[in-house]
Image: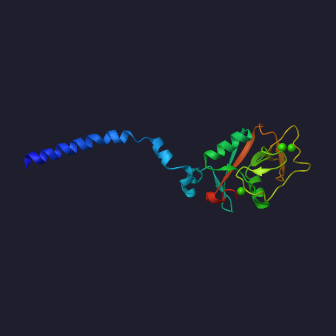
């Protein structure tokens, strides 16, 4: 009995000795490949935004973060994406007034015509349901493809995308309606 018990022990020892070898064969890239980003439930993607205490919540339940450190439009959008957010997408006049009130001076929103001149679109692909261009804008003066809110009335202007200015990020409550 004792011999077979020892044999069993040595078998266990051999098995446990084999575990590290198989474990080392599994690296993080395997998990990355096995779980594509598209398979992660949307609700979980929003955690970065919800967890960021810099966001304020509007009466409509949308989250916004104002950034006064000036950045070009693409850098501003990239900074919002870190939070699983985007530059603000203005869907209606109520939202325009609310976002305007969050920050003073000119600031970027997520509207642009970088893909097709004079065909403005939201960075999220949201339908264009509202615009508030300032007088004689957009004018593409000297090639302007990115949109700022430019005055206290909350009116919009197309400006050079490499201009440095503050910006506002927007996200859910749920990412399924991130373009609202
Ligand atoms: Ca333009
Ligand atoms: Ca302009
Ligand atoms: Ca919005």
Query: Residue 99: which quarter of the image?
Result: bottom right
x, y percent for residue 19: 30, 42
Q: How many marks?
A: 0
x, y percent for residue 149: 80, 49
Which of the two residues, 35 or 123, is positioned nearer the viewer here? Answer: 35
Which of the two residues, 133 or 151, is positioned nearer the viewer here? Answer: 133
Left or right side of 153 for 16: left
Left or right side of 35 for 12: left
- Residue at x 87%, y 42% (from the top left corner): 140
Which of the two residues, 152 or 72, is positioned nearer the viewer here? Answer: 72
x, y percent for residue 135: 91, 50
Q: Residue furthest bottom?
A: 60
Q: Is residue 98 above or below residue 149?
A: below
Q: How is the image coloured?
A: rainbow
- Residue at x 54%, y 57% (from the top left corner): 41
x, y percent for residue 157: 84, 47
């Amino acid at each position: 009995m004792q011999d077979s018990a020892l044999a069993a022990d040595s078998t266990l020892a051999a098995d446990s000795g084999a575990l590290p070898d198989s474990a080392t064969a599994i690296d993080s890239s395997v998990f990355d490949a096995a779980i594509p980003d598209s398979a992660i439930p949307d609700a979980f993607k929003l955690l970065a935004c919800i967890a960021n205490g810099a966001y304020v919540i509007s009466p409509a339940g949308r989250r916004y973060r104002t950034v006064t450190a000036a950045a070009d439009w693409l850098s501003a959008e990239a900074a919002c994406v870190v939070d699983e957010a985007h530059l603000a997408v203005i869907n209606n006049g109520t939202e325009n007034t609310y976002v305007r009130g969050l920050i003073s001076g000119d600031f970027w929103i997520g509207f642009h015509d970088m893909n097709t001149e004079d065909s403005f679109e939201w960075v999220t692909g949201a339908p264009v349901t509202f615009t508030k261009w300032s007088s004689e804008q957009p004018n593409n003066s000297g090639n302007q493809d990115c949109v700022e809110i430019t005055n206290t009335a909350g009116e919009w202007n197309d400006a050079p995308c490499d201009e440095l200015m503050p910006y506002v990020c927007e996200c859910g409550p749920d990412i399924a309606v991130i373009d609202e």
